[in-house]
Amino acid sequence: MFLSCHYFSHVLCRNTEINVVIPTPEGNEQITDKETQQNYDYEKGLPVVYLLHGAYGDNNSWMRFSSVERYVQAHRCIAVMAGVGNSFYQDMEHGDPYFTYMTEELPSYITKIFPASKKREDTGVAGFSMGGYGAWFLALSCPELYGKAASMSGALDIVSVCEEARTGAIDNPFRWEDNFGEAAAHLEGSDRDLFRLLEQNQEKGTLPELYQSCGDQDFLFSLNRKFHEKLVSMGIRSEYHEESGYMHNWDFWDQDIKRILDWMFPV
């Protein structure tokens, strides 16, 4: 079941749109069969994954460019897709409070309206590029909400990404001061720096399970490899994959989200 939902967001103070995919019995199944009831336990609540888009994207990106509806059906989980512009999933200094929206209002809406589990172990977040950073940022900032977080081709080292964007080394669609406010001038060691959030969660014992992947032809490959090496040096474990021949595009993300769902919600 694919739903496009338009509703008023009190956090964003405007109408907004999300896409939701809910697995339903397929043509060869009957909703009254015992086996089907076990597969689709709507009363108990189905696992849910929040799928985050990258720069230039919106809530329609996953539906337009991937086969995620089929993958979600196979894993019997709910997928939720929202649009946040080029905000890096922040409560923007000059713009919308997307972090609060993603971690407070949206989960509350989803678990009240749809048959979604409220349990941390049943809740994951995954994204690509800007959304790769967003997935880890949300999960590490609110580890009580998410059991697993996955990044594909992620802009994980926000300090290095910001520096390279400002020098023109990589494409820069971001208004850093609008997104991060005063923190944009000193991201390293701030509460937007994933390394600091990782250290804090490591100390508290609240780390979610982490997944990281990148194609070796991706312009963010070097940053991703260095980021993983830093994790290893910090003694932090993650599921890590380097894929030969893949670039920063949907050829990689569409096939990798299948592996992520296998890891996140094994059938």
Image: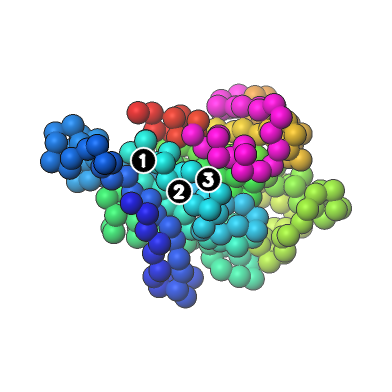
Extreme-front residue of the structure: 27
Residue 245 spot, x, y in % from top left: 71, 29
The answer to whether 81 appears left or right of 87 in the picture is left
Residue 94 spot, x, y in % from top left: 64, 71
Mark identifier at residue 73: 1
Closer to us: 88 or 198? 88
**Residue 175 quadrant:** bottom right
Residue 20 spot, x, y in % from top left: 39, 54
Closer to us: 96 or 64? 64
In the picture of the structure, the residue carrying the numbered disc 2 is 50
Which amino acid does the dot numbered 1 rest on? Answer: Gln
Which residue is found at the position 49% from the left and 34% from the top?
Answer: 258
Q: Earlier in the sequence, mark 2 or mark 3?
A: 2
Q: Range of the magenta residues?
A: 234-258
* Alpha-carbon span between mark 2 and mark 3: 15 Å
**Crowd rating for badge 3 (residues with CA inside 10 Å; few <14, some 14–19, many 20+):** some
Q: Secondary structure at mark 2?
A: strand
Which residue is found at the position 85% from the left and 48% from the top?
Answer: 169
Q: Secondary structure at mark 3?
A: loop
Closer to us: 30 or 261? 30
Q: Does any portion of residue 249 appear in the rendered image?
A: yes
* Alpha-carbon span between mark 2 and mark 1: 15 Å
User: Foreground mark, 2 or 3?
Assistant: 3
182 part of magenta stretch: no
Mark identifier at residue 96: none
Which amino acid does the dot numbered 3 rest on? Answer: Ser
**Crowd rating for badge 2 (residues with CA inside 10 Å; few <14, some 14–19, many 20+):** many
* Alpha-carbon span between mark 1 and mark 3: 14 Å
